Amino acid sequence: MNTTMSKLSIAVRKPVIKLVSKPTPVTYIGPGKAEETGRLLKMLGARKALVITDGFLHQSGLLNGLLDSIRRAEVEYTVFDGVQSDPTFAIVASAKQACTGCDTVVAVGGGSVMDTAKSVAAAVANHTEAEALAGMFKVHRHMLPLIAVPTTAGTGSETTVAAIISDTATHSKKQILDPKLVPMFAILDPELTVGLPKTTTAYTALDALTHALEAYVAGYADEETDRQARIAVRLIFQYLPKVWENPANLEGREALLTASFFAGMAFTRTYVGYVHAFAHTIGGKFGVPHGLANAVLLPHVMRYYLPVCGKRFAQLAKMLNLGTPGDSDQVRATRFVKLLYQLNRQMEIPKRFEKFPASAIEEVIDMAFQECHGVYPVPRYFTREHARKLMEAVCAKEDA
Ligand SMILES: NC(=O)c1ccc[n+]([C@@H]2O[C@H](COP(=O)([O-])OP(=O)(O)OC[C@H]3O[C@@H](n4cnc5c(N)ncnc54)[C@H](O)[C@@H]3O)[C@@H](O)[C@H]2O)c1
Ligand SMILES: [Fe+2]
């Protein structure tokens, strides 16, 4: 799709997208809140719940308090712990098998677990397989009641309309997008994220920062999404360095979960942009974790937006007290983008994707443009030449 057609498609979709109402989960925040799960299941009248997680989290004992609360509430449950990062439709199908006889779902894990749970809960309620739900507005019946308990602070999946599942045949990521995918409850319990390794903490927080910034510059942004995005940006800059220094900082962990939630609220209404389009493609093809893929690309794409987003970035710079009062918007905006590069250095984010060979650049651009153009309301379109320059800056270095 060429740029003119893309802009036209975005303009035509905008009023329709704005009309779609997107629910917000009933949300609990605070240390120990994961143990509300049993009470909530009881309140829902659940007979049997499927608890979806991954093998590492299950074996680590992280779920013990939550599972105890379900037992105390005398609700029957079974655990499916076969989720892997960047889940495939085959994993969703196995989890769906495990859901037989269950009437509610609890997701305890990162985005991979929550997306699996959303796909299962929707597929079961719609008497179909998850593949059939890929695309927009294909979930006709409400999914099974879902309680989402994130153990990473990044994807915001506990409040978004999306589930992202990998298609092994095409090595690409498919999206199920529907307001019926918003979980009924979200529980943001920082005690569950204190054990998150430093690298995963940084990758996932930078995923949330990407959600907030792509939402802030999007053509679908409005006052509410701006406010949500600003909250997320402020919390991440304030607390990510503190949590990086002291991973056990519970206040910081709670702030990052809150930031991720607000960023999710924002981008689920505005969509994302080029950072995610390239990150989904590179992540899907070369097995790069989602947050890391976004982190590497984020400063570059925001720098490309500078000529058209000066005012927006200047507002963020002002909020973060960057520069001096007399600075022009352009100076402030440049400072903000520099801060993104600085944060990446501080979080030890690599500059390049070592598994992404230069020979794949054209294919990556084709796939990313296909995902983005006409769907994501980006503020500035990449020409092929500029996209090539961006990919050359982040792909593996050719051997000399
Ligand atoms: N649905 C959405 O709106 C949305 C948005 C962005 C990304 N995503 C998707 O989410 C997935 C990525 O999710 P993610 O970044 O949360 O990573 P993840 O869920 O894949 O988890 C990454 C790793 O962290 C481990 N982990 C999780 N919590 C932990 C904890 N508390 N302590 C120690 N280890 C822990 C997991 O076991 C796993 O090995 C991708 O598939 C991405 O496409 C979805
Ligand atoms: Fe993301």
Image: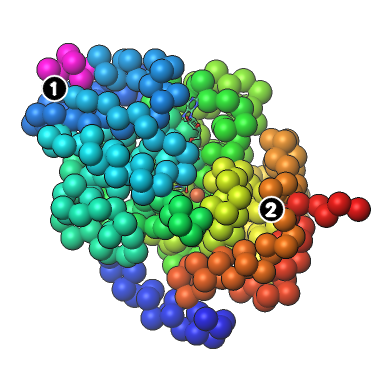
Residue 377: % across, % down: 49, 69
Residue 179: % across, % down: 27, 56
Q: Quadrant of residue 105?
A: top left
Give the answer, above or below, for where 346 lies relative to 341.
above
Residue 215 appears left or right of 385: left
Rendered image: mark on residue 356: 2
The magenta stretch is 69-75
Residue 218 appears left or right of 65: right
Residue 306 appears left or right of 254: right
Callout 2 environment at 10 Å: few (<14), some (14 to 19), or many (20+)?
Answer: many
Mark 1 residue type: Val
Residue 243: % across, % down: 59, 26
Q: Residue furthest right?
A: 400
Measuring 66% from the left and 23% from the top, which residue is drawn there?
245
Residue 44 appears left or right of 164: left
Indicate yes or no whether the magenta region holds residue 185. no
Q: Are marks 2 and 1 in contact (CB under 8 Å)?
A: no
Give the answer, above or below, for where 290 lies relative to 60.
below
Measuring 47% from the left and 75% from the top, which residue is drawn there?
374
Measuring 65% from the left and 72% from the top, which residue is drawn there?
382
Q: Earlier in the sequence, mark 2 or mark 1?
A: 1
Residue 54: % across, % down: 40, 29
Give the answer, above or below, for where 168 lies relative to 289.
below
Measuring 60% from the left and 45% from the top, which residue is drawn there?
288
> Mark 1 sits on what residue?
75
Rendered image: mark on residue 144: none
Viewer-nearest residue: 305 or 368: 368
